Image (cartoon, grey):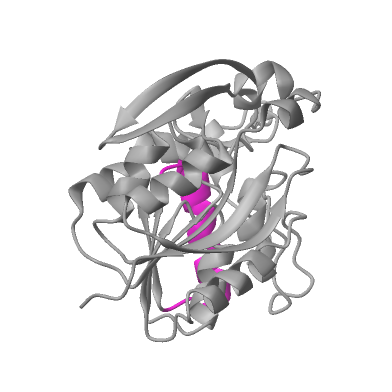
Amino acid sequence: MLHKILRALKRGPAGPVASAPGRAPILDQYVRSLPSDQNALDIFRGDWWSSLPPELPGLVAGQTPLFIDPRIHFAVQALGGVADAQVLELGPLEGGHTYMLEKAGAREVLAVEANVRAYLKCLIAKELLGMKACRFVLGDFEEYLRAAPRRFDAVIACGVIYHLRDPVELIQNLGNVTDRVYVWTQYFVAERLAAIAHMKHRFRTNEVAEVGGFRHTRHRYDYGDFLDTTRFAGGSDEFSHWLSREDLLGAFRHAGFTDITVGEEDLGHANGPCISFVAKKPPRA
């Protein structure tokens, strides 16, 4: 694992950094300027997705406001709050949602990230923002859920379900660890995706599957040239399976999450239809 991390630190957006003539390459790992927060961000210069929150003025990262994301405001409200809650976050990316959950009062946020570069960016964000209630762990959240090690008051699954090869298995495994889930995901609508130039060629096949007694159709999505950039933030395989809206919500109901509150839904999203919702199990007797 260490060699992967070292390679990640050496690669810039355009590939490995070239050494000055006659200079030992290992010396390129040293920063010789005055210590600063921007130096830490610049380890991944050009690779950040997230813009930083107002608490860090003047620092440059990405463009997407994931540290002040309205989806998480909806999640907290629809979940009934997360004050003093133990929360599991799947795929924190760069720690923006983790930060929002901590600010909302979560007692603990366990954030599981499989992408090495994303994991390291989360650690940078944690350091710069002084996050105390969260812990970032490096590994596969599907394997974590298969092990069902403990229960959580809530799970955040924002932008991850459509990146999985077996989304229904994950949904069913969520039922083993929590009674409350927030989801933002894209879903399959053939005519909508066929109208998006950069998406239409990525869906070629589908298959009927049955997982845990739930019969559904999986639509294969190939990442293709998206895999050629260091900013890739999808799943850990070369393809994933998307679900229709009906199968997506049906899978949650089949797993016991029968109380579903839909927030924002966008059929015209640039990368395909998407939906935001909270799914809950009925109160225990």
Residue shown at the point (81%, 26%) measured from the top left: 195
Principal secondary structure, stretch drawn in magenta: helix
Above or below for 87 versus 49: below
Q: Classify residue 116 by image quadrant.
A: top left
The boundaries of the magenta stretch are 114-132
Can residue 140 be seen in the rendering of this structure?
no
Q: Position of residue 172 (x, y in %)?
A: 31, 47
Q: Which quadrant holds the C terminus?
A: bottom left
The one nearer the camera, 174 or 198, is 174
Residue shown at the point (67%, 52%) measured from the top left: 42
Q: Position of residue 11 (x, y in %)?
A: 59, 34
Residue shown at the point (24%, 56%) measured from the top left: 176
Q: Is residue 235 toward the left or the right of residue 49 in the image?
A: left
Above or below for 203 versus 260: above
Q: Which quadrant holds the N terminus?
A: top left
Q: Classify residue 38 by image quadrant.
A: bottom right
